[in-house]
Image (cartoon, rainbow, N blue to C red):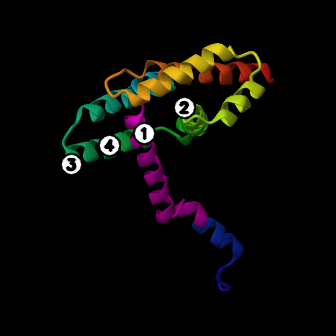
Amino acid sequence: MNPSRSRNQTELDEEDYGPSRTQQRRDALAVLTLAGQLVELQPSRLAKLPLPDDVRREIDITRRMTAHGARKRQLAFLAKVMRRYGEEEFSAVRAELGENREKQRQETAAMHRLESMRDRLIAEDEGALSELIAEHPQVDRQHLRSLVRQARVEKDTPNKPAKAYREIFQLLKELAQSSDSAEP
């Protein structure tokens, strides 16, 4: 604060000018980023979000654009349309996208764990099989062992479809879901 200016004058200056230009740029870029995320979102997920009709229309138009420059301009226009609405209008959308991103990361990590367990089972790792049976005593051991044997044969035979390989993954997925629903 400048010592020659009174406190009241400084408060008046802040009221008159509003947010700084840098802050306005940050806000505009945040809306542009949100617009880009909405355009890249799957149509089924986009339909669930509470968006104004004109914003939905502009998202559809932007999706149809294929030329890079035209798409970039249309995306900027979409952001301009979105800025007409208040921050509160898109707070639910931002929250939904943030939660979904974290949820997607968790689901992806769970799928990778299942894939690695399947690969360990097929790689003739008896420790993985005993570990899986210890975690899930309700599993049909005979069926699991036959699937593992079939998957090993499929792996060694080049033209054979990987049916057992996929079935093992589905079985592991069902076991994980049943243990998740039983925990809470």
Amino acid carrying label 2: it is Ile
Q: Can you tell which quarter of the image residue 128 is in?
A: top right
Q: CA distance from mark 1 to mark 4?
A: 10 Å
Q: Secondary structure at mark 2?
A: helix
Q: Can you tell which quarter of the image residue 125 is in?
A: top right
Res 104 visible: no
Q: Secondary structure at mark 4?
A: helix
Task: Return the residue at label 4.
Answer: 75
**Callout 3 environment at 10 Å: few (<14), some (14 to 19), or many (20+)?**
few
Decide if residue 120 is on the left or right side of residue 31: right
Is 79 in front, or is 106? 106
Percent across and percent down for residue 158 are 33, 28
Amino acid carrying label 1: it is Met
Q: What segment is highlighted magenta in the picture?
A: 14-41
Q: CA distance from mark 3 to mark 2?
A: 49 Å
Q: CA distance from mark 2 to mark 4?
A: 47 Å
Task: Return the residue at label 3.
Answer: 69
**Callout 1 environment at 10 Å: few (<14), some (14 to 19), or many (20+)?**
many
Earlier in the chain: of badge 1 and badge 4, it is: 4
Marker count (numbered): 4
Question: Tag on residue 122?
Answer: 2
Question: Tag on residue 82?
Answer: 1
**Callout 2 environment at 10 Å: few (<14), some (14 to 19), or many (20+)?**
many
Earlier in the chain: of badge 1 and badge 3, it is: 3
In this rendering, is residue 83 above or below 59? below
